[in-house]
């Protein structure tokens, strides 16, 4: 273990939990670190994966459509029966595959079509959000919320705000996840 | 695989913003897509015919329609492909109207997005499998738990429609709270006059079996096929012999608290709650019986003309099968003695609860309807009612409105004037008056104007005895001043709470309850009498406070839902449910923990180990278990994990902008 | 009587009584600088069993479902304070059968991190001796001998230990160790503070760098005492393919995140995964953070109370106020 390059030494320090050395990890220190600053990428439109429950938020998006509430075009929705069906992995997978943002939305607590699905889901989503941020994915790129079938206007507002937040950061490039 | 993609113009609804023709053509560039077509109105006759024709001619095995929301036309197109010879679940919809053309204005942008939506739908379609509904036999007998007015109404409706009904009631008689009431608002008709005939109907109905003095011990099974263990509690009286003559009650030397009369006057250790009880049978409260406490007495045995006393009787478990269960367990009155020490905590004799007052007013009650002071038997000159005792009060953990107290207080105030003469002073302390039913507001107005009952807006802070009176101290918030009234009798409009044991019962039935123990309906608006457990229904106050008209209306609603369920001989189950691939199940039971409906069960394998199995008729298809299973061995038919992952992947595939 | 003597006595007794079919403890490895798990079936063999600050293995890993052989074996085992938390976690979910267990709690004053010692020497270690409490004497193949204070070479997890005594045991090997006042101070999360303080870009860069080295040997998940999946791990599944087989930083990190979510509310921060990783990936960066957030969200420390359930398999309407 004597013949280490600087980079390896740094890794070993992290491994060993040597806090003083761990504090020195940063994007620039490793010669091989090919990670560019988040958002410092091209000007393609951002793409956002949305996962919504069938009964409330999907229907809320329908309501927004019926009301002709204009929205930015960056969101692609995946319909699932319930937010309880959403494995946190789906969001992580979307980031891995290059999503610039992930939005999850379901029924308000108490309104779940399956009565309890979103009670389990919200515990997971809260942890997911905190962990996503821990991975160095900025807060603005992940959101989970509740939109009911009647809240077309709220849906418009949620989408508009979220897309604006992601657009501010721009597309993600050269990321670890 | 041969997928057909149909892109709908929806007149100009879609075609106005999305380049429909180009998308239909471009769909052919997607893997497995062999047919692309744009149609003016896909949901119309000719549109559907075009799909069916393509299924036949192009041998399509998957169909994707890019049009409006699946909430709009998914059922339509499922039927359409079904008729076209394809399994209805090999169909997927791409919503390019509500989620695209209607919310965007720029044609190239909207077309790009619609393209992504179509690609995702095709990606999902590739993962779809044919699904088939199952049918299971159903048992048509119904269990009604609780024999209050709700249970009685539901049972009669069901029995009249020809179903066999069993009522399990934990007291010795049916009737519930309504049997204790004197008159009922807003019509002031006699409670017993309406209820007793219905109780008798229940007792005599050829389709109704009354199991009183019984409780539900255990419930297993699922909709259409419940197995229920019912505990027949030992009454120490052989009910097949007892003729309800009450001689035993007269001769019994042991006093016991009278639950029916809310503790006003004692009854005997052997008792029959009230003369119109159905069934009218005696039971011994052993903890008060001299024989059971000291080993000597047996007076009842000696006097009983029917030889019905049986000191050796034991609890007995009876197992029965049902297709549906109605929960009608009603209410308890808020236990105000512990909640409100400032009102004397039960130590002031002339402070009584609303339900006790009903018994005092009742001509067949312990006092023959004589309204008097319990301290000295005198007629009261001033009667004070206090509303919202144990309702809308966070400090006693009863933030909700009990919904009947405003009205029953007004009723009792009126009856006070009626019983004691118009010169008796009657005050009502209230927070505000909730009189939302038909004729209710008018009733309150009458009580205030015609009967001269004085309404004081404000809370009473303290009740205490002084000079033989009950001093009522409070604030009149309208005048903004302290008031103190020397009352002879104070009646607390005690609120409603879930009955003892409600949570226990809910857990046995695997239905949800709120933090106060009221049973939770499937959906407050869409499924108000169903629960989240298929086959279990709610009626009456068990679901939340309500008055008799609402209780009866709801009970009839419940009966019609049960009838709807049991009208069929077989139950068709939704195929969009979870299924466990047992070979990978590691028996961690997390699915069992999280399923809101208790659909997964431990199923014994040939080698004696256990693996999870989802009961088809119970699963509602939410997918919570699927997201929880660590080895991903549960899949949700219609929403398989690989389809979701493919959708994610497909949409994130970089596409050149057009 | 030393703790080691107690362990031997308890084991011998339980085997002789037929209370257990076999007893799991620790014994010397291929030389006296190493310890390995020991499975003792014969009361005559209990003298193999040892207790030293090298006994890092969490033996609870060996009693999880599918592990006991035969399946209904009655098993005795030693648990340190930290190990007992994983045992409690498994008991909470009824993943082990209490009736078939005989648990000897071993009060622990900290386990020595052999990797730390290795890094002190160019040569291989042949003997690690503990002449008395607190002293660690290391000898290398070339005969070099050096002494360390035990506290200086502890596993990082031991430096933060709040549960030196077993939370669940039938018998205890000697007097209890002094316990910290857990009411007064919550868990210590200082080990991840430096990482938390990095900027988003720095975090991504660091993760990319460390996870690029993972070789997907699955040692981390196999050694994890609360992982229930075994060879059924979704990371190997092709249908659905949750994680690509490609061994790249993204895929590796995703794989770890999956493991993390599967042990969410169940991981007791035992550190077994960290110790098992052959390429020394600091896995604690993820699961310690997860545990910190779970503690923050629910005040929940996995595996500390028998009557609790893992927090993601339940909900509480009165206290859950997440989301907007
Ligand atoms: C003081 C007072 C005055 C009222 N006055 C009026 C009025 O004037 N007009 C009006 O419209 N409404 C009035 N109400 C409301 C009325 O009493 C209720 O709306 C009505 O009684 C509800 O009927 P129910 O069948 O749902 O419940 P209940 O009458 O409570 O019947 C429930 C039955 O279920 C039984 N039970 C409970 N748990 C179990 C179990 N686990 N197993 C088996 N059996 C069980 C109980 O013993 C009971 O017999 C008044 C209420 C009170 C408290
Ligand atoms: S899909 Fe929902 S209802 Fe069906 S078994 Fe899973 S958790 Fe239960
Ligand atoms: S969660 Fe999955 S592995 Fe665990 S018991 Fe259920 S089906 Fe089996
Ligand atoms: S994830 Fe690591 S630290 Fe957590 S329980 Fe598993 S092995 Fe221990
Ligand atoms: S032990 Fe280390 S190298 Fe092996 S799979 Fe786990 S993280 Fe990767």
Image (cartoon, rainbow, N blue to C red):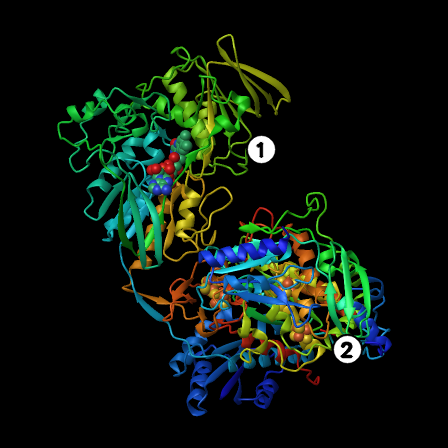
- Residue B409 horizontal side relative to residue A59, left or right: left
Q: Is mark 2 within 8 Å of ligand 5?
A: no
Rendering quarter of residue B132: bottom left
Report the chain holding disc 2. Answer: A
Query: x, y percentage for residue A7?
Result: 84, 76
Q: Which residue is mark 2?
A: A174
- Residue B53 horizontal side relative to residue B39, left or right: left
| Residue in the picture at 36% in, 34% down | B177
Disc ID at residue B630 = none
Residue B388 seen in the current view: yes
- Residue C148 horizontal side relative to residue B72, left or right: right
Q: Which residue is mark 1?
A: B395
Closest to the observer: A108 or B580? B580
To the question of a shared chain for discs 1 and 2, the answer is: no
Closest to the observer: B63 or B259? B259
Rendering quarter of residue B620: bottom left
Q: CA distance from mark 1 to mark 2?
A: 56 Å
Closest to the observer: B336 or B615? B615
Front of the two marks 1 and 2: 2
Q: Is mark 1 within 8 Å of ligand 1?
A: no
Quarter that holds the C terminus of chain C: bottom right
Query: x, y percentage for residue B405?
Result: 46, 32
**Is mark 1 in CB contact (under 8 Å) with mark 2?**
no
Query: x, y percentage for residue B546?
Result: 43, 40
Q: Residue furthest front?
A: C44
Report the chain holding disc 1. Answer: B
| Residue in the picture at 41% in, 56% down | B533
Residue C314 seen in the current view: no
Query: x, y percentage for residue C300?
Result: 63, 52
């Amino acid at each position: 273990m004597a013949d280490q390059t600087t980079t390896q030494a740094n890794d070993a320090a992290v491994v060993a939990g040597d806090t003083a050395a761990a504090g020195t990890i940063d994007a620039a220190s490793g010669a091989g670190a090919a990670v560019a600053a988040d958002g410092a990428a091209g000007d393609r439109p951002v793409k956002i994966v949305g996962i919504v429950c069938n009964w409330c938020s999907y229907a809320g998006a329908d309501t927004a459509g019926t009301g002709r509430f204009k929205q930015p075009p960056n969101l692609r929705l995946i319909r699932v029966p319930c937010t309880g069906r959403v494995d946190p992995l789906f969001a992580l997978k979307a980031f891995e595959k290059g999503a610039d943002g992930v939005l999850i939305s379901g029924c308000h607590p108490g309104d779940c079509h399956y009565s309890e699905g979103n009670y389990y889901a919200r515990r997971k989503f809260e942890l997911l959000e905190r962990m996503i941020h821990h991975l160095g994915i900025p807060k603005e790129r992940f959101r989970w919320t509740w939109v009911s079938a009647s809240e077309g206007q709220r849906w418009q507002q949620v989408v508009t705000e979220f897309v604006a937040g992601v657009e501010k950061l721009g597309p993600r490039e050269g990321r670890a996840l | 695989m041969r997928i057909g993609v149909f892109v709908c113009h929806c007149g100009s609804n879609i075609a106005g913003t999305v380049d429909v023709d180009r998308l239909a053509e471009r769909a052919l560039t997607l893997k497995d897509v062999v047919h692309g077509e744009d149609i003016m109105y896909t949901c119309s006759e000719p549109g559907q015919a075009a799909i069916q024709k393509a299924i036949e001619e192009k041998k399509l095995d998957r169909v994707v329609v890019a049009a409006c929301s699946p909430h709009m036309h998914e059922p339509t197109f499922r039927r359409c492909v079904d008729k076209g010879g394809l399994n209805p679940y090999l169909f997927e919809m791409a919503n390019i109207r509500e989620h695209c053309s209607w919310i965007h204005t720029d044609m190239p942008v909207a077309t790009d997005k619609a393209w992504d939506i179509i690609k995702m739908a095709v990606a999902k379609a590739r993962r779809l499998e044919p699904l088939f509904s199952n049918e299971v036999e159903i048992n048509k007998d119904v269990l009604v738990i609780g024999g209050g007015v709700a249970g009685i109404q539901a049972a009669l409706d069901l029995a009249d429609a020809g179903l066999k009904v069993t009522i399990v009631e934990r007291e010795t008689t049916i009737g519930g709270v309504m049997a204790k009431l004197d008159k009922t608002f807003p019509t002031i008709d006699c409670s017993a006059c309406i209820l007793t005939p219905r109780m008798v109907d229940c007792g005599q109905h050829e389709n109704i079996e009354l199991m009183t003095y019984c409780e539900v011990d255990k419930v297993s099974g699922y909709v259409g096929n419940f197995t229920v263990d019912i505990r027949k509690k030992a009454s120490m009286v052989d009910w097949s012999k007892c003729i309800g003559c009450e001689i035993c009650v007269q001769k019994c030397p042991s006093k016991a608290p009278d639950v029916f009369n809310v503790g006003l006057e004692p009854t005997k250790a052997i008792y029959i709650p009230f003369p119109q009880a159905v069934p009218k049978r005696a039971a011994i409260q052993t903890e008060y019986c001299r024989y059971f406490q000291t080993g000597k007495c047996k007076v009842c045995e000696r006097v009983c003309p029917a030889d019905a006393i049986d000191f050796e009787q034991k609890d007995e478990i009876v197992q029965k099968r049902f297709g549906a269960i109605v929960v009608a367990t009603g209410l308890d009155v808020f236990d105000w003695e512990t909640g409100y020490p400032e009102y004397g905590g039960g130590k002031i004799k002339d402070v009584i609860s609303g339900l006790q007052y009903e018994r005092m007013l009742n001509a067949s009650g312990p006092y023959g309807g004589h309204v008097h002071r319990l301290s000295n038997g005198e007629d009261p000159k001033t009667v004070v009612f206090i509303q919202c005792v144990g309702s809308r009060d966070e400090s006693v953990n009863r933030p909700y409105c009990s919904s009947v107290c405003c009205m029953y207080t007004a009723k009792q105030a009126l009856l006070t004037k009626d019983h004691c003469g118009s010169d008796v002073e009657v005050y009502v302390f209230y927070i505000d008056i909730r009189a939302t039913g038909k004729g209710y507001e008018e009733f309150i107005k009458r009580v205030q104007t015609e009967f001269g009952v004085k309404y004081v807006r404000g809370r009473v802070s303290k009740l205490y005895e002084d000079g033989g009176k009950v001093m009522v101290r409070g604030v009149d918030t309208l005048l903004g001043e302290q008031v103190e009234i020397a009352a002879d009798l104070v009646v607390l409009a005690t609120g409603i709470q879930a009955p003892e044991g409600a949570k226990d019962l809910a857990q046995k039935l695997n239905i949800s309850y709120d933090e106060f123990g009221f049973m939770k309906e499937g959906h407050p608006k869409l499924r108000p009498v169903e629960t989240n457990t298929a086959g279990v229904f709610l009626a009456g106050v068990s679901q939340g406070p309500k008055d008799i008209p609402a209780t009866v209306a709801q009970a009839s609603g419940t009966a019609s839902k049960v009838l709807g369920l049991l009208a069929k001989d077989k139950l068709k189950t939704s195929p969009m449910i979870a299924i466990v691939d047992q070979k990978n199940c590691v028996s961690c039971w997390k699915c069992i923990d999280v399923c809101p409906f208790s659909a997964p069960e431990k199923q014994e394998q040939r080698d004696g180990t256990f693996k999870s199995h989802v009961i088809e008729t119970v699963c509602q298809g939410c997918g919570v278990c699927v997201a929880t299973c660590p080895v991903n061995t549960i899949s949700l038919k219609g929403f398989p994990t690989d389809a979701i992952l493919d959708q994610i992947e497909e949409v994130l595939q970089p596409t050149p902008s057009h | 009587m030393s703790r080691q003597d107690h362990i031997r006595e308890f084991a011998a007794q339980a085997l002789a009584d037929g209370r257990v079919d076999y007893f799991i403890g620790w014994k010397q490895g291929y030389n006296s600088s190493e310890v390995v798990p020991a499975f003792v079936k014969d009361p005559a063999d209990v003298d193999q069993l040892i207790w030293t600050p090298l006994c890092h293995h969490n033996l609870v890993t060996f009693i999880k479902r599918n592990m006991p052989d035969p399946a209904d074996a009655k098993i005795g085992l030693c648990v340190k304070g930290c190990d007992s938390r994983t045992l409690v976690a498994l008991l909470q979910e009824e993943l082990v059968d209490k009736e078939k267990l005989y648990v000897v709690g071993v009060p622990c004053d900290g386990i020595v991190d052999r990797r730390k010692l290795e890094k002190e020497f160019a040569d291989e270690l042949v003997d690690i001796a503990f002449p008395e409490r607190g002293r660690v004497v290391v000898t290398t193949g070339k005969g070099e001998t050096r002494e360390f204070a035990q506290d200086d070479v502890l596993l990082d997890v031991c430096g933060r230990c709040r549960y030196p005594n077993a939370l669940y045991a039938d018998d205890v090997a000697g007097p209890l160790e002094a316990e910290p006042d857990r009411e007064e101070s919550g868990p210590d999360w200082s080990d991840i503070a430096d990482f938390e303080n990095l900027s988003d870009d720095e975090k991504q860069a660091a993760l990319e760098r460390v996870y690029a080295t993972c070789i997907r040997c699955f040692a981390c998940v196999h050694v994890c005492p609360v992982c229930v999946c075994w060879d059924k791990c979704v990371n190997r599944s092709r249908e659905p393919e949750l994680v690509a087989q490609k061994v790249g930083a993204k895929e590796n990190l995703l794989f770890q995140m999956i493991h993390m979510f599967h042990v969410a509310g169940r991981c007791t921060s035992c550190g077994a995964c960290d110790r098992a990783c052959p390429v020394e990936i600091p896995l604690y960066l993820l699961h310690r953070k997860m545990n910190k957030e779970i503690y923050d969200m629910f005040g929940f420390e996995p595996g500390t109370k028998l009557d609790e359930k893992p927090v993601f398999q339940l909900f509480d309407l009165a206290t859950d106020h997440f989301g907007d």
